[in-house]
Image (cartoon, coloured by chain):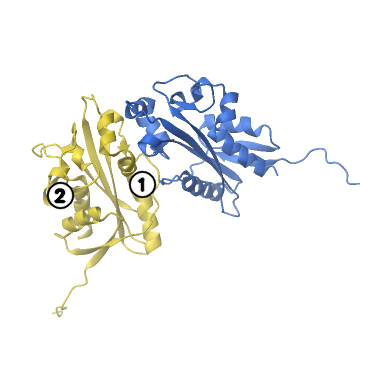
Chain colours: A blue, B yellow
Amino acid sequence: MTPKTSFTKKKVVFFVTGNVHKFNEARQVFAEYDFATAMLNLDAIEIQDDELENIAKASVIDAAKKSRLLVIVEDAGLFIEALNGFPGPYSSYVYRTLGTRGILKLMDKESQREAYFLSVVAFSSPKRLRPICFQGKVEGTITHKERGKKGFGFDPIFEPLGANEKTFAEMEAEQKNEYSHRAQALRKFASWYSK
Amino acid sequence: MTPKTSFTKKKVVFFVTGNVHKFNEARQVFAEYDFATAMLNLDAIEIQDDELENIAKASVIDAAKKSRLLVIVEDAGLFIEALNGFPGPYSSYVYRTLGTRGILKLMDKESQREAYFLSVVAFSSPKRLRPICFQGKVEGTITHKERGKKGFGFDPIFEPLGANEKTFAEMEAEQKNEYSHRAQALRKFASWYSK
């Protein structure tokens, strides 16, 4: 019989981000899984590309090279159908410059209000620089005005389908994590990583 | 007395771009200078950054490494003051998704219409990967509707100062080259490179 060790060394993954909101969403999701996580504020490259997955892959390869650690990055965007996918991969820049007000102005008198949030989590080890990606997507609509104060970014103008007409900014973090694109992608990663 | 050679070998610079409009603007400007130029359609990295100069530097380093040639890249953007600099470095993505119509909608009922076009030309040799940058800037205003069919991108809604209220899209290429941000930056590069 092999003796029991008094503790098991937990696997760790480093979440490369400068955004504490993102990290907190991840911490809540990962709490159910048997590995540890830490926030790593590292300046990883971010390329311009219409595909989130390509952006996340380039970032995670760069982060794994620079840190020599097991890392994930997460990239997300809001894709609005009537605007040909805008702001898409540039959502954070658009949020900083135009804000939710700019999006509402672009959507003024627009009846087609379908949109989705897409999240890509990319994982890489420092040895094998071949990223593995996990996607999460939530469909919904763009509201006519801002509603709610929680969350961040475009949360006050996005109402996911099947959530009693609440915007992401009107939900508690736990409730948002049931629906959110980011939580879905993080959960897919987590169940793969904890195997 | 040294004998005259029958010809002098001209210096060459490769303009890395997939945009034939840009290359034609460059050819016209460079015609006055004593070096040759060629279009090089190469997939150079393009990073996300609020500063055009940082984007151009990263691209030209990558292009010089990949091609092993003397290369320039050019990156430009339209910066609208009332929109906190939007669309800035993401002008081509925004043009593809929102178009001029989207910009006019964002600027609807906006009295502050100042904007500028900024261009950065970055040069690098393949040996010494330390880019040198040249900037050109043209100030103007955003029109209330599209005017003109020439040029490309946001040219129909941008009226440079001191050009008899013509938009870039209402000018012949020669006239635009007197004013344009891109021509200014290319000319600065050309006079430095031909020394």
Q: Earlier in the sequence, mark 2 or mark 1?
A: 1
On screen, residue B91 versus residue B65, left or right, reads: left
Residue B2, image x and y in percent?
15, 79
Q: Quadrant of residue B26?
A: bottom left
On screen, residue B162 versus residue B124, left or right, reads: left
* A146 over A127 or under it: above or below: above
Residue B47, image x and y in percent?
40, 46
Q: Quadrant of residue B38?
A: bottom left
Of labels 2 and 1, the one closer to you? 2
Q: Quadrant of residue A96?
A: top left
On screen, residue B147 versus residue B44, left or right, reads: left
* B114 over B183 or under it: above or below: above
* Residue lying furthest right: A1
Residue A162, image x and y in percent?
54, 26
Residue pictured at 22% horizontal, 52% vertical: B186
Please identify the quadrant where the C terminus of chain B is shown: bottom left
Residue B123, image x and y in percent?
30, 55
Residue that badge 1 annotates = B55
